[in-house]
Amino acid sequence: MAAAVRERPDPKAFYEQVMRNSSLHEKGFGEVFCWNAAYSLPHFLRAYQAWNDGAWLEWGVRYYEFIVSKLQTGPDGYKGWIGPYVYDPSVWCDVHVGDAILCDGLLDFALAVAADKRLSERYGKHAEQYIEIARKHVLEKWDSRGTFEPDGACGGYRSWNRYGAPGELKHWPVRDEVKNSRLSLPFNKQNDMAVVALKLHRLTGEERYLRRAGQIFAFHKSRMQLQGGCLLWNYWEPMGQADIDQGARRTRHWVGVHPERNYQAREVAQIVEAYHCGLVFDEQDIRRIVRTNLEVMWNGEERAPKFSNSNARLPGINHAKQTAGTLWTALADFDETIRRLMAVRAGGSSPRDAIMRAYFENVTCRRPPGFAPRHPLPAAAPFGFPFSDCTELNMAAALPAHLRAGEVCLLACNVLVPGKLDVRVRPVKGDQPPQMLDSGERRGQHFVPWKPSRPGNFLVRWTFNGGSYREAPVTVAA
């Protein structure tokens, strides 16, 4: 007990250390500022929850208010964290992920306040302010800018295409030539927006936020690959035909696992957030993700654990650099082995290490591991998708999955190793035989246009060498 007290950092000293980060004070408050600000954002609340020391919230609110003070008003009247664009610092803008990762932490604070009458009396006005920022200047703003693209039960965001000169806040012309303009966001950034929407629903009860979170998480789930009883996924996949360079016959962005380990670890935490609300992901999904981390990635050594990339068993991929593998600590809610591995890896002497170690010991471990959702929402439901075990195809998508008869659906896939690929489509109901749309030796990205002539519900199947396959449902309206 004495050791635990000695290692406990001082909240004022922690705040002062955080504020010494020079990236929080440089000119412009764009995405780089947001990532740096978000790094320490959760730790104030986690420390309070671990030690029940109200001083952490006092200093946390100081930090939150500092972050909010850096909001600036853009040309359409909405506020954002505006600064150099990470893909082209010669222009300024705000971005979805910057807004989302900061409001995520602010809404966590608001949820804690809403759950405690004493905290509500002290911090209620701060919580209301943070909720309003997320409502108006995140969800409403990016909808107003036309960046959300629904596709039936799924949907996601695209990058905006308006930018200003450095320091310019009023005139942002369309600049489609700027890198990644109108490109769909990668899954980590999509899910950051989904988490904000989900927390807004928990705070306000408004169904539109739950629907939005569900669409984004369903988009992610619909692109997962079942392989050996494990779920795998890429950092980015095309959301629609605008993500395809039709002339070059390839996607506008690479498809694969991100080489840095914190990306998928964060995506797992986002998935767990949805699961605990009963949204999109079910127990089987979580069990499959646990298997990915423990059966594919982990070397099986508790005393000296090492981790491979999540796609380590897929063929046709250069596995020389195993830099994406790590323990997915968000799974500690469900599995005792994950907890034991966390305890082994719980070293580190920084204040952040001490906070997260205390949170693990005093909060996470006080709940027995299990699959019961922590805060299920009455209106939330899992999203069903026809998974089939397939090793050779790490992408299979219908773009779009909802369209009208006479429109073109682009069937996109990525074949990891050479082989015969058949692409067929059949009605979900009835005994009509499948229609062969394409067949031949394939490797790499492959695109097949399909123009359905009549309405109905269909199932597209990509079959590799007459064996393993992946499927995607398509709905065609009249």
Image (cartoon, rainbow, N blue to C red):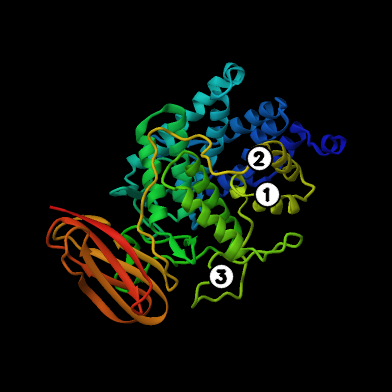
Instruction: Work out whether 447 lies above or below 133.
Output: below
Residue in the image at 62% along x and 39% along y: 41
Instruction: Work out whether 441 lies above or below 62.
Output: below
CA separation in Å, label 3 and label 1 = 23 Å
* Three-letter amino acid code at the position of disc 1: Arg
**Which of the two discs, 2 and 3, labels the residue nearer the N terminus?**
3
| Left or right of residue 134: residue 410 | left
CA separation in Å, label 2 and label 1 = 9 Å
- Badge nearest the viewer, 3 or 1: 1
Residue at the disc numbered 1: 339
Residue in the image at 53% along x and 43% along y: 101
Give the x, y percent position of residue 323: 62, 66
**Residue 87 seen in this snapshot:** yes
Image quadrant in which you'd find residue 73: top left
Front-most of 283 and 293?
283
Q: Which mark is residue 364?
A: 2
> SS class of the residue under badge 1?
helix
Residue at the disc numbered 3: 312
Contact flag, marks 2 and 1 (Cβ < 8 Å)? yes
CA separation in Å, label 2 and label 3 = 29 Å
Image quadrant in which you'd find residue 387: bottom left
Give the x, y percent position of residue 395: 40, 66
Give the x, y percent position of residue 335: 61, 49
Q: Which mark is residue 208?
A: none
